[in-house]
Each structure stands twice: as C-alpha cells, then as structure tokens.
Amino acid sequence: MEDVMLFGMVISPFVTRVEIALKLKGIEYKYVEEKAGNLSEKAIKYNPVYKKVPIFVHNEKHISESIVILEYIDETWKQNPILPSDPYEKALARFWSKFIVDKLMNAARKAIFYHDEKELEQGIEETTVALQLLENELKDKFFGGDEIGIVDISAVIIAYWLPIIQEAFGLKLFTSEKFPKLYNWSQDFNSHSIVKELLPPRETLMTNYKGVYERHVASK
Ligand SMILES: N[C@@H](CCC(=O)N[C@@H](CS)C(=O)NCC(=O)O)C(=O)O
Ligand SMILES: *[C@@H]1O[C@H](CO)[C@@H](O)[C@H](O)[C@H]1NC(C)=O
Ligand SMILES: *[C@@H]1O[C@H](CO)[C@@H](O)[C@H](O)[C@H]1NC(C)=O
C-alpha cells in the first residue's frame, strides 16, 4: 500500500499543480490543509528551507517545490506521462514550466504591487512580452500536444488565477483580444474534466485577492 500525502492550501496554484498531476495519474492521496502564514510544525519540519506548500510525502520521503514534485511524480508513476521522453523535448518542457513564475508571474507581480507609475508601466510591459512568448509557444490544443503536460499544469496560474487576480486589482493583463490562442487554451484547460474538479471556487479566490488588494491600497 502506497502512502501518499500532500500538504496544501486551497488557494495555492502551486498545490493545484500537484493535485492535477496526481489526479491525471489516478493516484490516491491524503490531503492536509495548512494555514497561510501559520504552517503546522509537521509542515515546517518537512520543508524547513522554504516553509511553503505544496509538500509531498511518499512513503515518508518528503519533497517540496511544485515543479520538483511534478517531476518526481512523473518518474515514479509512469502512466499518463506529463513530461516528454526525448531529452531535448523534456528540457524544453522544464524550461517553459520554470518560465511561468520566473518571468511571467514575477512581471505580473510587479504590475500588481507597483510602488510608482514607472513600475506599473514596466510590469505591464514585461507581462505582455512574457504572455506573447507563451502565446507563440502554443502549437497544439495543449502545450503538451493533444494531452495536458507539465507546461499546461504549471500554467494553471495563468489559466485560472491570473484572470481572477487581474480583476481583483483592476488590471487588464491577460485578455482574449491580445492573446487569442492562449485565451482559448485557458478555456480548454480550465474545462478539462480532471482540471475543473480541482480548481478552487472562483469566489473563494476573488474574496482572498480583493482582501490582498485592499490591504495593498491601505499600505500605500
Ligand atoms: N516555489 C514554490 C512556491 C510555493 C508557495 O509560494 N507557496 C505558498 C502558498 S501559494 C506558501 O506556502 N506560503 C507560505 C505561507 O503562506 O505561510 C513552489 O513552486 O512550490
Ligand atoms: C497558529 O496555529 C496554531 C496551531 O494550529 C495556533 O495555536 C496559533 O494560535 C496560530 N497562530 C496564529 C498567529 O494564528
Ligand atoms: C478560439 O476559439 C474560438 C471558438 O472555439 C474559435 O472560433 C477561434 O478561431 C479560436 N481562436 C484561435 C486564435 O484559436
């Protein structure tokens, strides 16, 4: 009997990444909800370096960092692969998975939490460039081809979270007019039978991000 556990938070896109991979592969797991800003002792013991979720525990072996967990899951359970087998294709998939946060979401964060007009403009410009790069990479229905792969899973934050976050903050970063292919992809991805069951309710996220927005405005 496999012992599989996931420490998560309902509002975390990084946790949803791991849940999508587990569900795609049909792996049963025990889920433990953690509190933002107040992780349990156990979670901190498992991830003392970052003190963040997701934390994945497989037969008492623990790992953190969502992309690292996705790769571990793909190598451990071979059914419904999410990474290509060709080394170069695999490297590219890793490259774009990493790009989602390193480039794209960090640029969006700049636009969202700007300190002055210059930073806002820069953030919007950098996010637009990054979304365009992703738009250009989309050659099939999904980044993974006909099936969902690691880039699609990593980009759940673009497909589902970004439209909600930008609405809460009154921004227009990701629109169907500017990024028609990426927009269509987001619709297909969010309505995929496995993905849609795992996405947290829109209202829960909206309430959370509106709160973040209000605290941000109050602190200025
Ligand atoms: N790079 C990490 C990011 C994970 C992350 O930022 N997790 C947040 C929740 S979205 C967290 O656990 N924050 C700690 C806290 O809220 O106390 C990953 O990809 O797994
Ligand atoms: C953090 O969680 C612990 C245990 O669940 C609780 O006793 C404590 O009051 C919490 N601290 C804060 C600041 O919420
Ligand atoms: C997006 O989807 C709509 C409706 O399915 C379709 O008419 C349109 O051509 C698609 N656009 C792109 C750029 O794929």
Image (cartoon, rainbow, N blue to C red):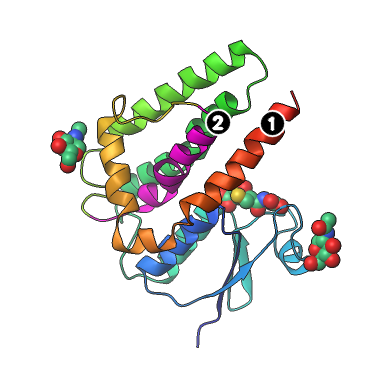
Horizontal arrangement in the rendering, residue 31 relative to residue 159 (left or right): right
- Give x and y (percent) for residue 74: 41, 63
Q: Could you tell me which quadrant the C terminus lies in?
A: top right
Horizontal arrangement in the rendering, residue 75 relative to residue 45 (left or right): left
- Give x and y (percent) for residue 219: 76, 28
What residue is pinned by disc 2? 169
Q: Residue 193 magenta-drawn?
A: no
Indicate the secondary structure of the residue bearing disc 1. Answer: helix
In the depicted structure, whether residue 196 falls above or below residue 111: below
Overall secondary structure of the magenta stretch? helix
| Residue drawn at point x = 53 percent, y = 45 percent | 206
Q: Residue 148 magenta-drawn?
A: yes
Q: Nearer the viewer, residue 147 or 186?
A: 186
| Residue drawn at point x = 26 percent, y = 31 percent | 180
Q: Amino acid at mark 1?
A: His
Kindly tell me whether residue 143 is visible in this rendering: no
Quarter of the picture for ligand 2?
A: bottom right
Horizontal arrangement in the rendering, residue 128 relative to residue 206 (left or right): left
| Residue drawn at point x = 44 percent, y = 26 percent | 172
Residue 133 lies in quadrant: top left
In the depicted structure, whether residue 86 falls above or below residue 172: below
- Give x and y (percent) for residue 61: 62, 72
Q: Which residues are magenta?
A: 147-170
Image mark for residue 216: 1
- Give x and y (percent) for residue 1: 50, 88
Query: How far apart, in angstroms, are the residues tagged by discs 1 and 2?
Result: 10 Å
